[in-house]
Amino acid sequence: MFIGEYIHTVDEKKRISLPSKFRKEVGKKLVVTRGLDSCLFLYTEGEWKRIADQLGTLGMAGSDQRGISRFMFAGAQEVSVDGVGRILIPDHLKTFAGMKGKVVFAGVHNRIELWDEKKWQTYKKVMETQAEKLSEKLGDIGAF
C-alpha cells in the first residue's frame, strides 16, 4: 500500500527519483498514465493489469466507457526504474500534468499520484477545507 507525500525535483536529464519508501513495492517497472485532477497515476505492473482488466470489462457501447478507456490506455506508458530509483516521465504526460520543477509523489493506496508541486499545494488546501463535509458524505453511505 502506498501512503505519504514526498517532494522531489526533476533533474537536468528530466528524471525523477522515486521516494525510497516506494521503491521496494514498485519493482523495476511502472505504468504511468493520465490521472484525474491534472495529475499522473503510477501503477505497479500487477496493479495495472488489474485496472486494465476492469476497464476491459466496460465494453464499447457507451461513449463514457470508450472515453475513459481511451483516456487511460492511450496515455499509458511503461517506465523503467533505474539502478538508483529514478524514472523518466514521457514529455506528453508531463505536459498533461503541467509539471515544472518540483513534483509531489502522493501515495494513494493502490497507486502513486504524481503532481506538479504548486498544483498539489492548491488542491490540498481545497481538500483540507472540505474534509469534514466529505467525511459526512462517506458516513452517509456507510463508508466511513
Image (cartoon, rainbow, N blue to C red):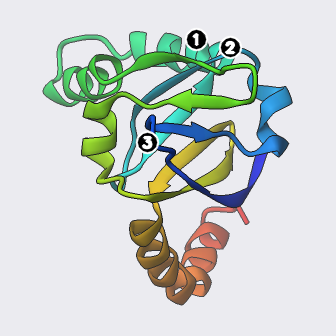
Picture coordinates of residue 103, whole percent (x, y): 51, 56
Q: Nearer the viewer, residue 64 or 27?
A: 27
Eye-nearest disc, 3 or 2:
3
For disc 3, the neighbor class at 10 Å (few under 14, some 14 to 19, many from 20) is many
Callout 1 touching callout 2 (CB < 8 Å): yes
Callout 3 touching callout 2 (CB < 8 Å): no
Q: CA distance from mark 1 to mark 3?
A: 17 Å
Q: Amino acid at mark 3?
A: Leu
For disc 2, the neighbor class at 10 Å (few under 14, some 14 to 19, many from 20) is few
Quadrant of the snapshot with the N terminus: top right
Residue where numbered disc 2 is placed: 46
Q: Which mark is residue 111?
A: none
Quadrant of the snapshot with the C terminus: bottom right
The secondary element bearing badge 3 is classed as: strand
Above or below, 36 relative to 119:
above
Displayed quadrant of residue 69: top left
Residue where numbered disc 3 is placed: 40
Left or right of 63, for residue 39: right
Q: Nearer the viewer, residue 72 or 85?
A: 85
Of labels 1 and 3, earlier in sequence is 3
Residue where numbered disc 1 is placed: 49
